[in-house]
Image: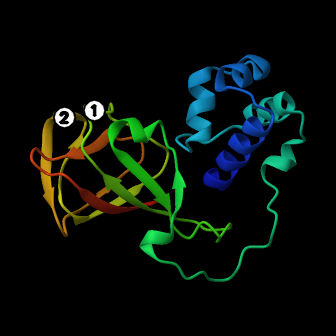
Amino acid sequence: MDLVNVAHKIRELRLQQQLTIDQLAARSGLSKGYISRLENFRTGASLRALNLVAAALGVEMIDLFRRENASPEYVFGHLNEGEFIDRNQSGEYGISYFALAFEKTDRKMNPFFIEYRPSDKRRELLQHDSQEFFVLLEGEVDYAIGSFENARRMRRGDTVYLDAQLPHGAVLAPGCQYAAAMVIYH
């Protein structure tokens, strides 16, 4: 199941109907947190849950998987041509996600370009159902796995590969005004 495309479709249909996450949760009988995780491709969904969401949106479940066009065999792109994704209100934390290769709809990996800027807020550690490969391209971040107390300073060229479900997160290192990374979810 392509979580990113299903997530986009759910969000697209919800916004077209001018529904809030709370309203979709109430209509579907699922929690607000679960709907948020679905839309932010942080969890896989059971067929039962997808059926409830589809019914709440007034569409058939197959519509959540339907692609407008067949996926191309390959796509070229550039780091500054990614599609902006608001993921877990990331903008509030100075983090911007850009989906790369988003036109390849049958992809097995989900590559993102991420920018970090100063923020007064620090996001809690996140977990998801995907393995993750992270490479820092510019700047410095403190990358935490398990807790912020044992964060590791990462510099340009440093990488980390994580198994699914490990709580983790990155914040700008003190004194750093900008960092950029590439992350691949699989």
Q: Quadrant of residue 90?
A: top left
- Where in the figure is residue 6, as x and y percent of width and height? 69, 49
Q: Quadrant of residue 144?
A: top left
- Where in the figure is residue 165, as x and y percent of width and height? 41, 41
Q: Name the side, left or right, on which 136 lies relative to 184.
A: left
Q: For the residue carrying disc 1, how many other residues have a C-alpha within 10 Å: few (<14), some (14-19), or many (20+)?
A: some
Residue 82 drawn above or below residue 43? below
Amino acid type of the residue that numbered disc 1 sits on in the rendered structure: Arg
Amino acid type of the residue that numbered disc 2 sits on in the rendered structure: Phe
Q: Are marks 1 and 2 in contact (CB under 8 Å)?
A: yes
- Residue 136: tell me if it is visible: yes
Q: For the residue carrying disc 2, how many other residues have a C-alpha within 10 Å: few (<14), some (14-19), or many (20+)?
A: some
Q: Which residue is mark 1?
A: 122
Name the residue located 31 percent from the left edge and 41 percent from the top edge: 168
* Distance between mark 1 and mark 2 Cα atoms: 10 Å
Q: Which residue is mark 2?
A: 148
Which color scheme is applied? rainbow
Secondary element at image label 2: strand
The quarter of the picture where the N terminus appears is bottom right
Residue 132 drawn above or below residue 76? above
Residue sitting nearer the eye, 115 or 29: 115
Question: How many labels sit on residues?
Answer: 2
1 or 2: tag closer to the N-terminus: 1
